Amino acid sequence: MTDLGGRPEEQPESAELRSELTKTVRGEVSFDVTARALTTMDASNYRRVPLGVVAPRDADDVAAVLAVCRSRGVPVVARGGGTSIAGQATGTGVVLDFTRHMNRIVELDPDARTAVVQPGAVLDRLQEAAAPHGLRFGPDPSTHGRCTLGGMIGNNSCGSHSVAWGTTADNVRELSVVGAVGDRLRLGRDWRGAPDGLRALVEGELALLRTGFPDLPRRISGYALDALLPERGADVARAYCGSEGTWGILTEAVVRLVEAPRARALAVLAYPDESAAADAAAGLLPLGPLTVEGMAADLVPANAGLPRGGAWLFVETGGGSPAEARAHADTIVRAADVQDALVVTDPAGQRALWRLREDASGTATRIPDTVGGPQPGRGPGPGGEAWPGWEDCAVPPARLGAYLRDFRALLAAHGLRGTPYGHFGDGCIHVRIDFDLISTAGVARFRRFSEEVAHLVVSHGGSLSGEHGDGQARAELLPAMYGTEMVRLFERAKDLWDPDGLLNPGMLVRPHRLDENLRFAVLPDRPVDVEFGYPADGGDFSAAVRRCVGVAKCRTASVPGGDDVMCPSFRATGEEEHSTRGRARLLHEMLAGEIVTGGWRSTEVRDALDLCLSCKGCRSDCPVGVDMATYKAEFLHHHYAGRRRPAAHYALGRLPFWLAAVTRTRSTRLVNSLASVRPLAALAKRLAGVSPEREIPRLAPETFSQWWSARFRDRVRAYMRERRRGGPGEGTDEGGSGGRRFASGLFPGFGGRTVLLWPDTFTEHLEPSVGRAAVRVLETAGLAVLLPPRTVMRHGPIGDGVTRGPLLLGTLLPRRRHRVCCGLTYVSTGQLDRARTVLRRTLDLMESYLVMDDLAVVVLEPSCAAALRTDLPELLHDDPRAARLAAAVTTFAEALERYAPDWTPPRLDRPAVGQTHCHQHAVLGDGAERRLREAAGLTGTLAGGCCGLAGNFGFEKGHEEVSRACAEEQLLPAVRAADDTAVVLADGFSCRTQLAQLSDRRGRHLAEVLAEALENGPRGAGPA
């Protein structure tokens, strides 16, 4: 049932539970649509709809929640970062979110090498606290930037350094737990904290416990009851690790810290294939490496810079000095039988290589070159979807190569594909497989394969889980590994800890079936009607949304990798609904229609997307390529179809139209004068939906095109005068030389290459100085610069932005002039019908150029270039001209690098600060810009992240706080720290505006900096 607002009605039982929890818990109690929708899934294939979410403030709150839920028979599930891959962080009762309040590092004792942490503390925060003391927490999953210590303890997580420092269980000293019946327990050795009856249970089954567990470094499956053996210290805390929240709710942990190596080196060992790499891994362990990680070529970009091979081992070594670490790595290279090898000692180079490995859990979900085109549940060509489901088994390291060969054969027998990678030194393999989890036949095959591979793992002496736990994905298969007698013992232990069976039921014991509760089952079975083409997803919006597999790289509190962008709004607010994952989850539930029932009219989805900056950072930084900017534009288009839009959509979303109107009516001075009157400016901002804190940018008195046209006409007149006097312009066009002389006369230094310079709205009306500077630099480099036409060229282009063509009868007929436009502001506000009209008109204007094979369109504004590269062909996917124009787009630096390779820029020899534009990072890449800066002697690295203005976003009312927070993350601190000699670079108009309004420094486009240097005549300027 739904209420009149389109939201599902709250059932009486749920309302009573919410009311009682609100009275007894000091933390937040959220039973609303958004909170529930955000916690239906983790990073697994499974989905469950909770009744509500509670963010406890302390252990008393946890006890209160358990008491209320126990009285009503409601299940309770503990949730950390929500990155669990086996489904154990989802549930149908009350979900406890520890990341909001219980997330502190309570104490750190460097002398004892211990830390006291709360369950919601993120691993990276512990590492940062321990680093100044030369310490660290040993286990480090690839999700270290967002996984929590509570989740790691619940799963007994490991990470890449487990060959040196073990699993989480190896690094836990004491645990504080609230039991299912409300008792406060302090778990430790010698039976400390054990519930009544547990010791008697163990002592009655000593023979089974001593013989029923495989001896593996990565045996995570089942309960670790063997840790309770007397010869192992009867360690209740260690036994609790990996219990997946089914024994009690963790509220605090004392963990061991280890000494971090002062220096590290990374040896990358190349092998012909993954089996050869797996065979070699165990032999490296006696040499004492910190890590032995394996990856195959399937997961590695072609330009990754790895040594020649089909698979690689990443072997990290440590030492007291860089030389010692390097010597250790060299020893391993000499001992290894490799095809090729590389040793990296540079920390930045090591980080770049480790990012390849850390992103694998997302990268592996897209399998390239699906044979036979789109298939149900596998996504459309050219790539297929791949899922967890058999994510992390472990076998004895010496058996890994043999297991992988058998595993590959089993995949082939079932017609499945997957790319294994992972912790080869521990015999633990991760793999995403292209299961069809939508059709009945596909789900049945998923089940058959899981059952067969479980027996295969056991035949090699392995564990069904080597890191992520059993959850729903593997718990049903535990009898294959342990036998029925041990599984019954697990059930008896669970009953002692949780007599009512309310703690994360269905996990580990008495499990749900592995093919139940699949998250894809609720999605529409037919493609949704959409505007964008979604070429990577076969036009299927559902397939685009389900790209998000929940690895949550978007939930990191700091910019991952230093220069990444995703996800600035989450880092500003810390709210799940403002992360890329959170928004994808809401869109998923919108399509499902069970919780979010409003469809495209959903206010919950609208509100979550409202703070999306459309930075496109997720398009490049998300391992699976979620493109939330496009999804937002799609949603806004449908949400406001036939309805009144926010005022900012009309004012800022149609900015090109309004600015063109001002120019056409010659009212620039009047507009600037009115905007300088504070009361009038305040009224205008209020009517336009603009934040009152924002200043209205001034319009340029002369547009870039006006400057260009006047300059072009002057050059033509000068050329014609010279020609009449018999100067260089005279001659015939033999073999094309006349045309070249014509161009040489118009463009001094012309080297034969013509480029079109795109007059974007910001350069045209607000900062034409950027366009003038670009023309100066491009012409100095020997390029002829023309502008796109303003009317459809029926007789060939002239390129001055004004001239129509030869004087023929049709030319004399009046035609309305237009300007090319990338449609960016229309797209970002979801006005896709208008965007499509503007873009088709742009293609009409450009059509006579689009037949050229070597067309080069130089776009100075990164956001406009990105829109032409991506939004244009994806929105007009039915128009072949769109792809041709997109392919012709180059940035300013790319144009100089490609078309004037012999030109040497002027040397500035100054430091540079600023920020790489987020669209530049996400869509265009900044390699050419970096090389141009280096050639010009501009030293330093530009910041990552997003400036926070993001076009219309930062101007819209209600966005000021988030906009400023984004700027304060990297951009403003970097600029404040720079000395007066530093050049502040900001190629985007938004970035420059943000700097102008929030700092006392002026940012400039790289073209302006180079043009100024040319004017001042530094050494090295001009053609080489």
Image (cartoon, grey):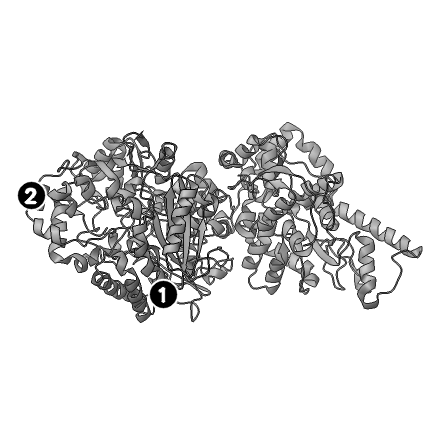
Give yes or no for contact between labels 1 and 2 (Cβ–Cβ under 8 Å): no
Frontmost residue, 647 versus 705: 705
Residue 590 location in percent, x, y? 39, 51
Secondary structure found at label 1: loop
What label sits on residue 200 in the rendered view? Answer: 2
Secondary structure found at label 2: helix
Which of disc 2 and disc 1 is earlier in sequence?
Answer: 2
Q: Quadrant of residue 118?
A: top left
Distance of mark 1 from mark 2, alpha carbons? Answer: 47 Å
Frontmost residue, 834 versus 150: 150
Visible in this render: residue 537? yes
Going by the numbered disc 1, the residue's amino acid type is Arg
Going by the numbered disc 2, the residue's amino acid type is Ala
Label 1 environment density (alpha carbons within 10 Å; few <14, some 14–19, many ≥20): some
Frontmost residue, 493 versus 748: 748
**510 relative to 967 in the view: left or right:** left
Question: Total of numbered circles in the picture?
Answer: 2
**732 relative to 493 in the view: left or right:** right
Q: Is residue 333 above or below residue 179?
A: below
Dot 1 corresponds to which residue? Answer: 417
Residue 701 location in percent, x, y? 74, 39
Label 2 environment density (alpha carbons within 10 Å; few <14, some 14–19, many ≥20): few
What label sits on residue 563 in the rendered view? Answer: none
User: Residue at left 27%, top 45%?
Assistant: 166
Residue 851 location in percent, x, y? 68, 65
